[in-house]
């Protein structure tokens, strides 16, 4: 069977069996919803491929329909790479979510694992901690790295509280640390260090040279 077969625009032709459709060129779908439905417990999915390989997206787990509300992405060898589970959690490299308080995104690997934030050479790479959708509530807490001057800052309640500059100097209450540890104040007020201990303990400030 051939659909829309004219000299300039032959979009889809049937090949092999009645259930096989092949696009002969670029296929553009302009409808509202493309529904892929399998009325059995067999594998249901969408395979996207070229001559080099393919990516398989399907809504079941290992073809057994353990949870049909999950979206699973696999490679050509059917190795799972990512899933979005029925709760909307994103799992990369694993099928098990993290701690219940930090499980919206879980990244796992069998060796060293991590997440990379790559920014422009004169831009910021940041993580924002938000408890709202507007104003200061969108960035109450910030961990940010400035690639122009190569320093890292830490904000609480919207304001910068600590900075580690490109030399490794740490500034608390100051954006210009001059020593390995500099403590100041951003505005008026005193710059202080408080030492506390239990009633039977000792609060000390020790100075040493070398390892002593």
Image (spheres, rainbow, N blue to C red):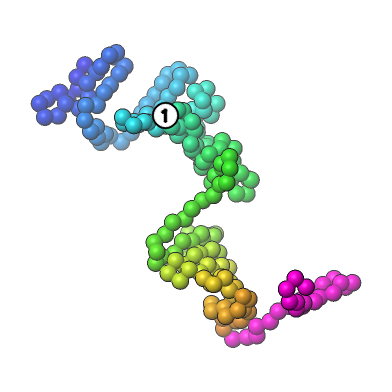
Residue extending farthest to the top is: 17
Q: Is 201 rendered above or below residue 72?
A: below
Q: Quadrant of residue 185?
A: bottom right
Residue 179 % position (x, y): 60, 79
Q: Nearer the viewer, residue 104 or 23?
A: 23
- Count of numbered circles on the image: 1
Q: What main secondary structure does the magenta stretch of the protein show?
A: loop
Residue 4 drawn in magenta: no
User: What residue is shown with label 1?
Assistant: 76
Q: Quadrant of residue 129?
A: bottom right
Residue 31 % position (x, y): 27, 34
Q: Is residue 178 left or right of residue 12?
A: right
Residue under the point 39% across and 24% down: 37
Residue 28 visible within the image? yes
Residue 172 visible within the image? no
Q: Quadrant of residue 14?
A: top left
Q: Is 86 rendered above or below residue 139?
A: above
Residue 65 % position (x, y): 51, 24
Q: Is 110 rendered above or below residue 193?
A: above
Q: Nearer the viewer, residue 67 or 154?
A: 154
Residue 72 % position (x, y): 47, 33
Q: Is 35 rendered above or below residue 138?
A: above
Q: Read off the magenta span.
A: 188-212
Residue under the point 31% across and 29% down: 51
Residue extending farthest to the left is: 7
């Amino acid at each position: 069977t051939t659909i829309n077969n004219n000299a300039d625009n032959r979009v889809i032709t049937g090949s092999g069996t009645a259930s096989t459709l092949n696009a002969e060129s670029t296929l553009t779908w302009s409808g509202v919803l493309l529904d892929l439905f399998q009325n059995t417990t067999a594998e249901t999915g969408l395979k996207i491929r070229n001559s080099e390989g393919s990516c398989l997206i399907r809504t079941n787990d290992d073809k057994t329909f353990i949870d049909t509300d999950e979206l699973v992405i696999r490679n050509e060898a059917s190795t799972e790479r990512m899933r979005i589970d029925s709760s909307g959690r994103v799992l990369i490299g694993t099928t098990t979510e993290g701690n219940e308080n930090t499980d919206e995104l879980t990244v796992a690997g069998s060796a060293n694992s991590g997440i990379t934030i790559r920014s422009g050479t004169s831009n910021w790479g940041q993580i924002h901690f938000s408890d709202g959708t507007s104003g200061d509530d969108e960035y109450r807490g910030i961990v940010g790295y400035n690639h122009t001057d190569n320093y890292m800052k830490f904000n609480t309640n919207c304001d910068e509280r600590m900075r580690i500059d490109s030399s490794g100097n740490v500034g608390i209450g100051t954006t210009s640390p001059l020593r390995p540890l500099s403590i100041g104040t951003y505005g008026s007020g005193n710059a202080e260090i408080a030492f506390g201990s239990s009633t039977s303990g000792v609060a000390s400030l020790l100075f040493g040279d070398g390892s002593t």
